């Protein structure tokens, strides 16, 4: 077991420092790059917070859908392959719901301000 | 200094020019650069843009038409009344500036978010979708026998190409697989008519002023193919910049786009437009994957590229909204 503060707390502290202390000092292209850097740290913080929970649910859905076990990466490879072969399609019960749930969890980490995501979130997750 | 070479060049082809001033690099990629500068002239300065591939630079990507073709297309478009900068000079060996061309600088805005939000463009915005329809009709009517040599791509070839690009990323994406299946199932086959296709006609590649579209830029992906490709690409959600209920670049409706296109005497095939919108959404998603790969393997290790890699999921939600819409 590693000591604390946790990775989330550490990453967040760096993002907060850059946002409040460094942003006012920088302009031009460097300011643009600083914003990108802060966005990266915010994304990492969201992933560290949410990934374990969303991966567990994703694996659960994939096991039911595919009838096999494996890591989240292995199961995604298996699903991709079955869709490519035409063995699984939108007529397969649970596929559409699975893809929607998985994609919403990805957007929650990658781009929670993306307009399409916010619209779909408004429909109830 | 690039101004030395530019001054020598303009003296040869711009009557009365006394030199150049204010050269500044606007963008530089792996194979191309864009510079702005002013030609000094007794009648007042002339705004100009240089697009070039400097000597010793890497070859352009295989999909690119090449700078010589770009110059020819922009000139043809200009002559046909399609809003386009006038090409002033195509570089020769004498210029010692590499390969490329110099064009007239058109004033206006290209940054999509500004065009969608600034008051300057408020009066123009409601008319842009229809205007774009008319411009695309003009572009698709450019005479084939005058075009430079361009690659030719139909829907079936494009699907195969994107599938190959996607597989080379070794990136398991069930939503992309679903989109590839959908595209194969809905492949409309070769179009009745083959025309010039701009290939990257979208909000972000247009110079817009208070009066509307002033110039169409970035012709490097021009090719021969299904004209409906351009109508689909301009509707891809990634180019609506948050204005998701206005499919045409965040400006307006498909109905307005189609009306502008048909008023200019050309026919719209709405099913094909939808096909190309799905294809375009997947295309941008795969390009995001390409950015991730270049971030990992390229020497620059750019943060921006890394973050574009994480935007592939935006195209996944947009593909689901197109192919498996819920609750509506």
Image (cartoon, coloured by chain):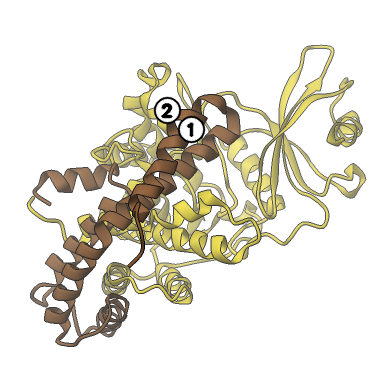
Chain colours: A brown, B yellow
Label 2: how many Cα within 10 Å (few below 14, some 14–19, many 20+): many
SS label for mark 2:
helix
Write the residue at 20% across / 86% down.
A69
Write the residue at 43% across / 29% down.
A20
SS label for mark 1:
loop
Outermost residue on the bottom side: it is A68
Query: Is A46 on the left or on the right of A64, as rendered?
Result: right
Query: Is B224 rendered above or below residue B115?
Result: below
Total numbered badges shown on the rendered structure: 2
Foreground of the two, A32 or B184: A32
Label 1: how many Cα within 10 Å (few below 14, some 14–19, many 20+): some
**In the rendering, at what x and y percent does residue B126 appear?**
31, 26
Task: Identify residue for label 1.
Answer: B111
Query: Is B260 on the left or on the right of A50, as rendered?
Result: right
Which image quarter: residue B119? top left
Do the residues at discs 2 and 1 belong to one chain?
yes
Callout 2–callout 1 Cβ contact below 8 Å: yes
Write the residue at 37% across / 29% down.
B116
Query: Is B37 on the left or on the right of B42, as rendered?
Result: left
Mark pair 2, 1: CA separation: 6 Å
Q: Chain of mark 2?
A: B
Task: Identify residue for label 2.
Answer: B115
Write the residue at 35% across / 19% down.
B122
């Amino acid at each position: 077991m590693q000591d604390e503060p946790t990775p989330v707390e550490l990453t967040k502290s760096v993002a907060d420092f850059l946002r409040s202390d460094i942003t006012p000092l920088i302009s031009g292209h460097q300011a643009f790059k600083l914003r990108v850097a802060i966005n990266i740290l915010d994304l990492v913080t969201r992933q560290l917070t949410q990934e374990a929970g969303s991966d567990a649910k994703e694996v659960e859905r994939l096991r039911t859908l595919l009838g096999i076990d494996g890591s989240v990466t292995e199961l995604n490879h298996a699903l991709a392959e079955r869709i490519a072969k035409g063995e699984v399609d939108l007529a397969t019960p649970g596929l559409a719901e699975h893809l929607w749930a998985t994609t919403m969890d990805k957007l929650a980490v990658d781009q929670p301000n993306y307009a399409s995501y916010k619209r779909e979130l408004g429909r109830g997750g | 200094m690039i101004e030395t070479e530019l001054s020598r060049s303009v003296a040869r082809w711009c009557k009365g020019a006394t030199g150049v001033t204010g050269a500044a690099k606007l963008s530089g990629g792996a194979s191309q650069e864009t510079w702005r500068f002013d030609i000094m002239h007794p009648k007042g300065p002339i705004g100009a843009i240089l697009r070039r591939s400097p000597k010793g630079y890497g070859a352009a990507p295989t999909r690119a038409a090449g700078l010589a073709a770009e110059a020819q297309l922009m000139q043809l478009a200009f002559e046909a009344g399609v809003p386009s900068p006038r090409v002033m000079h195509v570089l020769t060996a004498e210029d010692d500036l590499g390969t490329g061309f110099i064009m007239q600088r058109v004033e206006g805005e290209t940054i999509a978010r500004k065009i969608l939000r600034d008051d300057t463009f408020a009066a123009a915005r409601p008319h842009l979708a229809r205007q774009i329809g008319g411009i695309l009709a003009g572009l698709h009517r450019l005479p084939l026998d005058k075009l430079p040599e361009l690659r030719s791509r139909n829907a079936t070839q494009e699907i195969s190409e994107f599938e190959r690009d996607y597989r080379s990323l070794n990136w398991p994406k069930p939503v992309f697989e679903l989109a590839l299946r959908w595209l194969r199932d809905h492949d409309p086959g070769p179009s009745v008519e083959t025309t010039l296709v701009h290939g990257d006609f979208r909000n972000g590649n247009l110079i817009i002023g208070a009066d509307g579209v002033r110039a169409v830029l970035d012709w490097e992906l021009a090719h021969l193919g299904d004209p409906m490709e351009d109508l689909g690409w301009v509707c891809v959600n990634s180019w609506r910049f948050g204005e998701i209920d206005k499919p045409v670049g965040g400006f307006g409706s498909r109905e307005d786009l189609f009306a502008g296109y048909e008023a200019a005497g050309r026919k719209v095939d709405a099913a094909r437009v939808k096909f190309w919108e799905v294809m375009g959404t997947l295309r941008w998603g795969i390009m995001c994957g390409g950015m991730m790969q270049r971030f990992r393997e390229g020497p620059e290790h750019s943060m921006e590229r890394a973050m574009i890699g994480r935007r592939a999921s935006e195209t996944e939600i947009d593909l689901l909204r197109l192919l498996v819409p819920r609750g509506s």
